[in-house]
Every structure is written in structure tokens, then in C-alpha cells.
Amino acid sequence: METCMLCGLARYSMVNELAEKDYLVELKYDGERALAHTKGVFDFELFNRRGRNISVQFPEIVEAIRKWLPPNCMVDGEIVAGNLERGGDFQTLQKRTHLQDKFKISLLSKTAPATYIVFDVLKWIGQDLTNLPLEERLEKLKERSCNRPMCFNTIKDGWSYVQTKECEGLILKRKGSHYSYSRSDNWLKLKDIKKLIVEVVQTEITIKGGFKLYCENGIKVACGKRENFEHIKELLGAGLKPLVEIAYLETTEKDNLRQPVFSRIIGGKANV
């Protein structure tokens, strides 16, 4: 079964190394990647990146796509809920992706409908387009009533928007590139990573041999390398307060950090 093309990773410090004229700059959406496939007039499938058919969970998207996508076509896109200007809200969408109750699915499809943002065209009326240049594939979407990503003239313009609106980041798509059903640097993911300095209050070696840090405000994060873990233990043993830097995407509705990752040790602070 085909799967969505995954993005390579980029940092804003790399931007000057990129030939900006070679990329399309789009807003990164915070939702669920999905391939939409029309096998016939009435035969429709919506698969997430793990290959699960989620057509039942999003009837409003199925209905909307059927109005503009011809039979025997496949497109790549993202299911998004919440504020589209900010790239959507993953927490809101997550409440729907595993729903099985038909009444709740029907109700939410009307009271809190999701949107399908179309990224690319993989097949068009039976013709495989993956080896065509990106711009030629996107030509198929002209004069079609589908939702397309927000675009920017430059990376700088897009990054300014991301920081102003507190979005997740940008997607940079190499012009003239082909589509691959795997990870590819033809699409680069540029995230707005936030950082926080916190105090470590306790350490733990997990059952599986991992190194976990328990920090102030209930923050838990894997430490990664043993040498960092041992250094933090030494600071605690010396009666100091270890300070570490945590990278994360955003703060959730419950004030938790989304996707926290240990970044580095700042040092040890004396108890006062």
C-alpha cells in the first residue's frame, strides 16, 4: 500500500544555505496526513500514513472531496481541524481520529468539521504522475474547488507569519521534484522549536534501560546519552539543582509540553 512522502528536517539556521528560488514555501499544518483515493464513481478511500482507512471518521471530508476529485485519482494532503490560519489544532483533531460511535462522528462532522488540505497529486484519471515535476502535478488542481496550503513569497515572509501566529512551522518543496512514497529531502520541514530551561528534581533508569528526567512543573523527558544522565546525577549528589534546556513544539490545553526533547545541560545551581 502506498504511503505519504515524509519530509526531511531543516533548521532556520540552514535557510541561508538553501537556494530560496528553488523552493515553494507553504505553511506547515498540524493535523493528520492522509491519501485520498477515488477508485470509481462511488468507491472512495481515505488512508492515514499508517495505512488505516479513516473514511468513516471524517464523512464531511469524503463528501467534499467527491465533489471535485474525478474517479481513479489519488491526492496527498492533511486533515486539519481548528484554526486554519495557525495551521490547525492537533489536540482538537485527535479527539476524532479514533472515534467509532456513529452518532458522535455525525455530530462532530457538523458542529466541528475538519478540512482536507491538498498537498500534491499522485494519480489523475488512472495516470501515475509521481515522476512528473511538482509544478506539473499541481496543474491538475487548477479550477478545482479544493483547499490548498497557505503559500508565501519567501522563507522570511513565511517564518515571520509562523512566529506572529504561533504556528508549527513551514514546508519547503523543491520545484521540479518528483514524488516518492518514502522520506525525501525534496520536501523539508522547518519547525518553530521553542525552548525552556527547567530544574531536574529526580532521575530514573527505566525498565527498558532508558534515562528519564523528572523536572519541575511535572515535566518528564528522556535524557538520551548516559554521560548526560550521569552528569545530572552527580550535580544532584553534590546538592546542586541541575538546570537543563528542553525543546518542545507547543503547550497543550492542559499546560503540558508537546513533544518535549532534552537539549542540553545548562549547569548546576546552588541551593539557597
Image: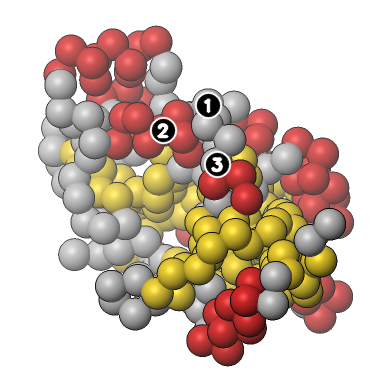
Disc 3 on helix, strand or loop?
Answer: loop
Position in image of residue 218 (x %, y %): 54, 46
Question: What is the number of the mark on residue 167?
Answer: none
Looking at the rendered structure, the kind of residue marked 1 is Gly
Which residue is the site of mark 3? 256
Q: Residues within 10 Å of mark 3 (few under 14, many from 20)?
A: some
Identify the residue shown where x is 29% and y is 76%: 208
Residue designated by label 1: 82
Circle 3: residue type? Asn
Q: CA distance from mark 1 to mark 3?
A: 19 Å
Q: Residues within 10 Å of mark 2 (few under 14, many from 20)?
A: many
In percent of the image, x 35 and y 71: which residue is there?
206
Q: Is residue 166 left or right of residue 56?
A: right
Which picture quadrant has residue 36?
Answer: top left
Q: Which residue is mark 2?
A: 93
Counting labels gives: 3
Question: Label 2 sits on what residue type?
Answer: Leu
First in sequence, mark 1 or 2: give its number. Answer: 1
Mark 2–mark 3 distance (CA, rounded to whole Å): 17 Å
Q: Is disc 1 in contact with disc 2, using a CB cutoff of under 8 Å?
A: yes
Q: Is residue 6 above or below residue 33?
A: below
Of 217 and 125, nearer the camera is 217
> Viewer-nearest of labels 2 and 3?
3
Dot 2: element: helix
Quarter of the rendering occupied by the N terminus:
bottom left
Q: CA distance from mark 1 to mark 2?
A: 8 Å
Between residue 103 and residue 145, name the one nearer to us: 103
Q: Quadrant of the C terminus?
A: bottom right
Q: Quadrant of residue 244?
A: bottom right
